[in-house]
Amino acid sequence: MNTENTEKLTDHMKYMEGMEDIGSEVMDKVIAQMNSFDYNAYTEADVKKALAKDVLSPEDFKALLSPAALPLLEDIAQRAKAETRKHFGNSVYMFTPLYIANYCENYCIYCGFNCHNKIKRAMLTMEQVEKEMQTIAETGLQEILILTGESRAKSDVKYIGEACKIASKYFKVVGVEVYPMNSDEYAYLHSCGVDFVTVFQETYNSDKYATLHLAGHKRIFPYRFNAQERALKGGIRGVGFAALLGLDDFRKDAFATGYHAYLLQRKYPYAEIAFSCPRLRPIINNDKINPKDVHQRQLLQIICAYRIFMPFANITISSRECAQFRDNIIQIAATKTSAGVNVGIGAHSGQQQGDEQFEIDDGRSVKEMYDMIKSKGMQPVMSDYIYV
């Protein structure tokens, strides 16, 4: 990109009109710690010292994410497994995502939904939303995650709220993964039945972030960063965090994700915390990004480090991952898995209206995932409240 074009881009650190600014206390701490994280400075002794502790400090978390920890991955996985059993027993929570719209006003160069991609756009009517929910509810699932592209013009807050009201009729737990909002808008969604809000920061490196998010509200780094805190201020009980691993230096991004959640947990002790661990998957523009590859061993290292550092957090394993990896990680550190995944718009009821955001790897049905979890000696749980 030439300098002339760069100068015309919106300042990614400056709030746009209408965006609520709750201050940057947490963000400043996270960025400072991330920038000072020299992961090559840690030794095997640092890793062993961290594993010997009952409660880990952010410094110990850094050691577990360092290259020095890889030779000790077996020990780390054993500790992660022990923490998971202690806090979650052998439960694995099941949910499915429902994409209700894919209109988007952002220009994120790595995403299949971005506003310049020529894909089939769609937005479900409430009648279609209800039909999708009925189809999903028939599988026995009791938790749903509602997703849209990031377009306030097309899928406004009221539209999302109406979909959540319908979801509350069919599901015990309703989560949303939509564009970041102000705290009063989160309070409205809470009144519509929303329990959880997940926002992926994508990368915590603001300079890299600016090169990937060229236009739209998502370009504004601090507004996205503070979304979880605004959701908690709006009365939402649980918040989810993630970096899209592979966009930038994955060790620094994994540290920032965990430390961000850690600081909010300390500030809002009753908040439920969840992590997702997505890696880049092939999409339309894949040749333009140069992903920094995150191999399965590194992904396992990151997930186990999250578990040991934040023992009470839910960890979701994406259907972007292959079946074998998902089957193994639920026995070690992940506590939540998607099932019966269709990432197209309106795809659950067999009448897909719009294109999908990315490719999935594990397309198993709810019954297949349920049976697999049972076969591993684990207990599939359809929601927070009901054991099946």
Image (cartoon, helix red, strand yellow):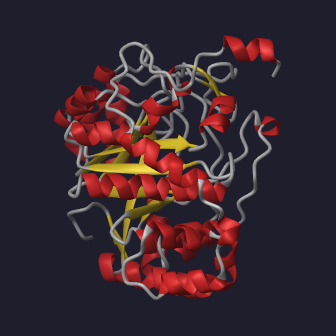
Q: Position of residue 283 (x, y in %)?
A: 71, 39
Q: Name which quarter of the figure residue 269 lies in.
A: bottom left
Q: Position of residue 97 (x, y in %)?
A: 44, 46
For the residue pair 13 and 120, the one nearer the viewer reads as 13
Q: Do we see residue 375 in this rendering? A: no
Q: Do we see residue 185 in this rendering? A: yes
For the residue pair 95 and 150, the one nearer the viewer reads as 150
Q: Position of residue 372 (x, y in %)?
A: 49, 74
Quadrant of image for the N terminus = top right
Residue at image point 34% right, 26% down: 21
Q: Name which quarter of the figure residue 65 lies in.
A: bottom right
Residue at image point 64% right, 78% down: 69
Residue at image point 31% right, 31% down: 22
Q: Is residue 26 above or below residue 93?
A: above
Q: Is residue 167 above or below residue 92?
A: above
Q: Name which quarter of the figure residue 8 lies in.
A: top right
Residue at image point 69% right, 30% down: 211
Q: Is residue 162 above or below residue 316?
A: above
Q: Position of residue 44 (x, y in %)?
A: 65, 84
Quadrant of image for the C terminus = bottom left
Apparent side of residue 189 relative to residue 365 in the rendered image (left or right): left
Apparent side of residue 190 relative to residue 91 in the rendered image (left or right): left
Apparent side of residue 75 relative to residue 334 in the rendered image (left or right): right
For the residue pair 161 and 203, the one nearer the viewer reads as 203
For the residue pair 294 and 55, the one nearer the viewer reads as 55
